[in-house]
Image (cartoon, helix red, strand yellow):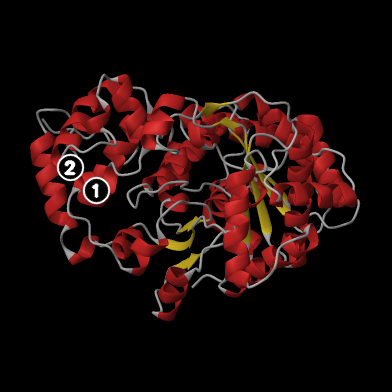
């Protein structure tokens, strides 16, 4: 059975929406300022052997759906063959109706492989063979998959200890798509586990050749790595946090806490929060000094399932929304930097939709007129990067800030097949604006609205991050 499910006007329910998408949004390039693509796979221009490799490996969204559909772990993260895993995914797809995975999967089949057929157990074999055959051709290498989607900039997610050798290789080879690192120093402040943190500090000491016996020395070593990232082109940091950290502390207290860490002593909860609070301030000061943008991702509870975490590790689909207190500590954290006039450009992402309006209003407190949209409410993230979540984020930002200054969508994915999420976002945005035109809430001026759509799709990010784009 074939279908035109993903047709030209998918999700576009008015003439205005269709005009905005087809004439303004569709042709805009992609600025993917936050993702989890592998720099090594880009550097080697990886050729995937089959559809399961590029579609199912590392995709915890799909694994969660498969488990919910009664698929056992060997077919998700286990040792079953790629084709066996794909068949289980194909059998799950019809059960994902009204889940964004149903939209994404069929958009990806169409955009990359030209397939309009609905994926189900009956069509699984032909789709798997068709796509796998295409993937084994040079036109479907990792770099060409990015070219196919008109990607201009990719910012990966990288630990400060990373050598960045793959980013350096990519740049030296003259790949026209910029592939830049993003500074992700979560492990540097993970004071809840002194043993793991000490192992990270020991590696930092080895890499930098520095003796790290004081907090001041620790910061100097981290700054050395920060400098290295800057030299390789990094202009963005990223932090995965439960909530904002704004515990009161003194320099002497942080020095004493660091010595306890190096002695292998476990810290009290208050000491952990003090250490995290100090580090977040120091990270932000480094970013401000180099004119970077800091991204703060707030709110998940990670690795909830202890049994399966021990069995298959983190980032495998056992994380969920948290409901942490955020408003007051976030205000204190941002204000601590702003009173020094050292608050960097900042993007705030919430994983719980209850925080949309909190974030949108908080950002307005720290807009200072230095650049348009200095403080950004990040796009619908993780559990919210679907139609309803994106719509709520767009509406909150529209009502309480300036949608026109929004830096738009990101991929936040480990898969080279995830770039249609940008198209998905653009269709949703154009449909919202089109409905407003129908309702008389926006002028029927396609040039005015079209410019905003193009800015949100690409131009705002290009101007905001200050990374040269070819």
Q: Is residue 180 above or below residue 149?
A: below
Closest to the observer, 8 or 258: 258
Residue 16, percent from left and from top: 47, 38
Q: Secondary structure at mark 2?
A: helix
> In this rendering, would 100 be left or right of 3?
right
Residue lying at 19% horizontally and 56% vertically, measured from the top left: 135
Q: Are marks 2 and 1 in contact (CB under 8 Å)?
A: yes
Compared to residue 71, the image places residue 239 above or below, namely: below
Quadrant for the N terminus in the image: top left
Q: CA distance from mark 2 to mark 1?
A: 7 Å
What numbered label is drawn on residue 53? 1
Q: Is residue 7 visible?
A: no
Above or below, 91 against 34 in this view is above
> Is 368 or 292 nearer to us in this picture?
292
In the rendered image, residue 347, in percent from the top left (x then y), is placed at 66, 47
Nearest to the observer: residue 288 or residue 424: 288
Give the crowd class for mark 1: few <14, some 14-19, many >=20 residues within 10 Å: some
Name the residue at 77% across, 51% down. Answer: 259
Closer-to-camera residue (55/94): 55
Q: Is residue 195 left or right of residue 111?
A: right
Percent coordinates x, y for residue 185 in the rendering:
62, 53
Instruction: Left or right? Give the position of 282 relative to 201.
Output: right
Question: How many numbered discs, if any?
Answer: 2
> In the structure shown, which secondary structural element does the residue marked by tag 1 occupy?
helix
When asked about the image quadrant of residue 172, the answer is bottom left
The percent coordinates of residue 377 (x first, y second) are: 66, 41
Residue behind mark 2: 82
Q: Residue at x 63, y 57 (%)?
A: 201
Q: Is residue 54 visible?
A: yes
């Amino acid at each position: 059975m074939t279908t035109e499910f993903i047709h030209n006007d998918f999700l576009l329910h008015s003439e205005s929406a269709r005009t905005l998408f087809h004439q303004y949004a569709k042709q805009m390039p992609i600025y993917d300022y936050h993702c989890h693509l592998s720099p090594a796979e880009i550097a080697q221009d990886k050729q995937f052997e089959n559809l399961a490799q590029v579609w199912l490996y590392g995709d915890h969204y799909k694994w969660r759906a498969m488990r919910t559909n009664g698929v056992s772990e060997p077919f998700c993260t286990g040792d079953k063959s790629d084709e066996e895993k794909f068949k289980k995914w194909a059998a799950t797809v019809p059960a994902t109706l009204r889940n964004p995975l149903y939209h994404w999967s069929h958009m990806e089949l169409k955009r990359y492989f030209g397939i309009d057929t609905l994926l189900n157990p009956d069509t699984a074999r032909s789709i798997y063979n068709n796509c796998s055959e295409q993937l084994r051709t040079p036109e479907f290498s990792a770099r060409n998959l990015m070219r196919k989607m008109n990607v201009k900039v990719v910012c990966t997610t990288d630990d400060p200890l990373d050598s960045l050798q793959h980013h350096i290789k990519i740049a030296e080879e003259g790949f026209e798509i910029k592939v830049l690192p993003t500074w992700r120093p979560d492990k540097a402040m993970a004071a809840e586990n002194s043993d793991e943190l000490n192992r990270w500090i020991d590696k930092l000491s080895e890499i930098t050749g520095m003796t790290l016996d004081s907090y001041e020395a620790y910061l100097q070593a981290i700054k050395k790595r920060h400098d290295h990232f800057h030299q390789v082109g990094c202009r963005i940091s990223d932090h995965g946090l439960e909530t904002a950290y704004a515990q009161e502390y003194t320099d002497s207290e942080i020095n004493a806490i660091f010595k306890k860490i190096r002695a292998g002593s476990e810290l009290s909860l208050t000491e952990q929060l003090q250490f995290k609070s100090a580090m977040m301030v120091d990270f932000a000061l480094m970013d401000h000094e180099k004119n970077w943008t800091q991204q703060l991702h707030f709110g998940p509870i990670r690795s909830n399932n202890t049994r399966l975490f021990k069995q298959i590790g983190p980032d495998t689909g056992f994380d969920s929304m948290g409901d942490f207190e955020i408003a007051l500590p976030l205000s204190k954290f941002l204000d601590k930097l702003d009173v020094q006039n050292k608050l960097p450009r900042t993007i705030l992402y919430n994983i719980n939709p209850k925080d949309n309006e909190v974030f949108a209003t908080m950002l307005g407190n720290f807009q200072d007129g230095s650049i348009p949209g200095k403080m950004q409410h990040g796009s619908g993230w993780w559990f919210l990067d679907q139609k309803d979540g994106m719509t709520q984020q767009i509406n909150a930002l529209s009502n309480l800030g300036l949608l026109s200054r929004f830096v738009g969508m990101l991929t936040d994915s480990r898969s080279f097949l995830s770039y249609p999420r940008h198209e998905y976002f653009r269709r949703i945005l154009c449909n919202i604006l089109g409905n407003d035109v129908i309702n008389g809430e926006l002028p029927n001026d396609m040039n005015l609205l079209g410019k905003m759509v193009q800015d949100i799709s690409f131009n705002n990010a290009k101007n905001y991050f200050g990374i040269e784009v070819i």
